Amino acid sequence: MARIFCIANQKGGVGKTTTTVNLAAGLSRIGQRVLVVDLDPQGNATMGSGVDKRSLKATVYDVLIGGAGVREARVTSEKAGYDVLGANRELAGAEIELVNLEQRDRRLKLALADAIGDYDFVLIDCPPSLSLLTLNGLNCAHGVIVPMQCEYFALEGLSDLVNTIKQVHANLNRDLQLIGLLRVMFDPRITLQQQVSEQLKAHFGDKVFNSMIPRNVRLAEAPSYGLPGVVFDPASRGAQAFVEFAQEMVERVKTL
């Protein structure tokens, strides 16, 4: 059965979408069957997977309001090697429509149940706010992967996110746990980043992934070509780091 993971952080601009699409591409590269669910109305994970969000016949919005099933709405990214349940601006309206629907915070979980056997991993790219969309993601996930930069303000936001995970675990989803913290945009030459990294390891121990994603120009360029960095330039340091992270994820899943 597929393992479902949210890639979440309540702080914006920390590389959630970059992590989602590159982890998906890395997992696909090592033989895993992957579905990316784009829960952000901006649709960046959709476009970053080589899928045109404007041409989608059905999106995650249709799935959430019951207008389509996951198998109908998903599309395959031939370039990236995984399936995508895409999003576009329509998803912004789902917040309002979900309020009046039954089981409004479990709609995604119920919808995914039909297609769960088709995959080894389902990766959900969450928006930065704690909204009904994020809650739908957290409600169906086995765990949360937190990409974070090793900076002071990132530590401040992390405590809020950990509390959110604890609350959802206690009240809505007993399976939910913090899977791990992924250090992204890491530059070992910056003393502060090394210090924050050490603080993370001291406080969270083995919840900090061994893999680190370096600050890498090729990863930053890849979205403008509609590709994950792992596909855009497989030889780049960033791409190789994400493939290593994918291998670490496969090993970590075995211990859950």
Image (spheres, rainbow, N blue to C red):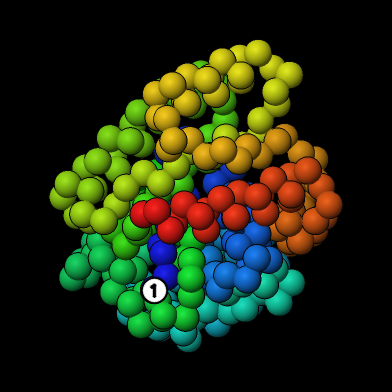
Q: Where residue 141 appears, x then y in whole percent?
A: 35, 59
Q: Quadrant of the N terminus?
A: bottom left
Q: Is residue 95 visible?
A: no
* Residue found farthest to the left: 171
Q: Position of residue 224 (x, y in %)?
A: 77, 54
- Within-10-Å neighbours for mark 1: few <14, some 14–19, many 20+: few
Q: Residue at x 55, y 46 (%)?
A: 16
* Nearer to the camera, 82 or 223: 82
Tell me where residue 147 appears, x and y as whole percent. 52, 40
Q: How many marks?
A: 1
Q: Relative to residue 32, is residue 156 depicted above or below?
A: above
Report whether 197 appears left or right of 5: right
Q: Report the side of 237 relative to 139 (left or right).
A: right
Give the residue type at disc 1. Met
Q: Position of residue 59 (x, y in %)?
A: 49, 74
Q: Residue furthest bottom?
A: 72
Residue 141 visible in the snapshot? yes
The image quadrant of residue 129 is: top left
Determine the image quadrant of residue 60.
bottom left
Name the residue located 25 percent from the left edge and 61 percent from the top edge: 105
Is 65 situated above or below 253?
A: below
Residue sitting at x 63%, y 37%: 212
Q: Is residue 27 depicted above or below 176 in this figure?
A: below
State the residue at coordinates (34%, 57%). 142
* In front of the other: 78 or 54: 78
Quadrant showing the C terminus:
bottom left
Q: Is residue 251 left or right of residue 184?
A: left
Q: Is residue 234 left or right of residue 10?
A: right
Question: Which residue position is annotated with label 1?
Answer: 1
In the rendered view, tell whether residue 126 sits above or below residue 198.
Answer: below
